[in-house]
Amino acid sequence: MNDNRLQTALSRLCNAWEARGLFSRHRLITVGKQMAQWRQDKNIPGLWPRPPVLATATLDDGIGMGLDLIELYAGVAGMRVERWGLLMEPDALVEKCKTGYPDLLGLTVLREDAMGLLDEGIAPRMPGVTTILAGGPVFRMLPLSEQKEKPYVILPDLSAFVRYVLSLNRMC
């Protein structure tokens, strides 16, 4: 029997965020931790029989607050999460992807010059098995037409990330 409780809970959470706006960072963390505990207490499986691997890193962010959130909610969904580092160089990221082959690479990009590094120094050199998920303030101002032309998935906020994770469940 297929257990849909986790998918339903995450979908409802996204609906609430989309209707009322994202919670404060503190509340997002609290809710994520509560969901992780609920999943553990109820012995609810993750969304996949073989969890995808999400590697996370930043190009121009020395704090990684966005990574904290996507790592938390990716874990709630049942992904295997590996934090690769903050302020990583493009060559190091590409090399780690070529040796580690994560399913997904979650990147925080804060500034437009770092988006150029992603467009020219990372995306064209990535192994085909890894999908880049890019988020951060620089993408919120990018017109939709330009977003669609990028060789990676743009997820401007946590709700978009969780919706993407839920769509992966339907593909796997």
Image (tube, rainbow, N blue to C red):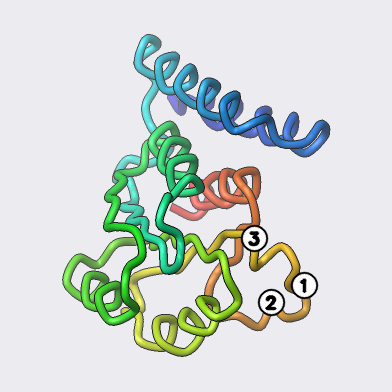
Rendered image: mark on residue 144: 1
Query: For the point 38% across and 41% down, which residue is it?
Result: 48
Name which of mark 1 and mark 3 comes first in the sequence.
3
Amino acid identity at mark 2: Lys
Amino acid identity at mark 1: Leu
Side (left or right) of 143 relative to 13: right
Residue 134 pos. (x, y %) = 53, 64
- Which residue in the structure is indicated by mark 3? 137
Please tell me whether mark 3 sits on a helix, a strand or a loop: helix
Residue 18: image quadrant is top right
Query: For the point 42% across and 22% down, which residue is it?
Result: 36
The answer to whether mark 1 and mark 2 are in CB contact below 8 A is yes
Give 53 or 82, whichever is nearer the viewer. 82
Name which of mark 3 and mark 2 comes first in the sequence.
3
Q: Is residue 169 above or below residue 107?
A: above
Residue 87 pos. (x, y %) = 36, 65
- Which residue in the structure is indicated by mark 2? 148
Please tell me whether mark 2 sits on a helix, a strand or a loop: helix
Side (left or right) of 70 relative to 40: right
Mark 3–mark 2 Cα distance, whole angstroms, equals 17 Å
Residue 13: image quadrant is top right
Query: For the point 52% across and 21% down, which residue is it?
Result: 30
Mark 1–mark 3 Cα distance, whole angstroms, equals 14 Å
Q: Nearer the viewer, mark 3 or mark 2?
A: 3
Residue count near mark 2 (Cα–Cα under 10 Å), binned few <14, some 14–19, many ≥20: few
Give 138 or 101, whichever is nearer the viewer. 138
Q: Nearer the viewer, mark 1 or mark 3?
A: 3
Residue 113 pos. (x, y %) = 55, 80
Residue 155 pos. (x, y %) = 61, 58
User: Where the N terminus falls, by quadrant?
Assistant: top left
Query: For the point 60% across and 27% down, which residue is it?
Result: 8
Amino acid identity at mark 3: Pro
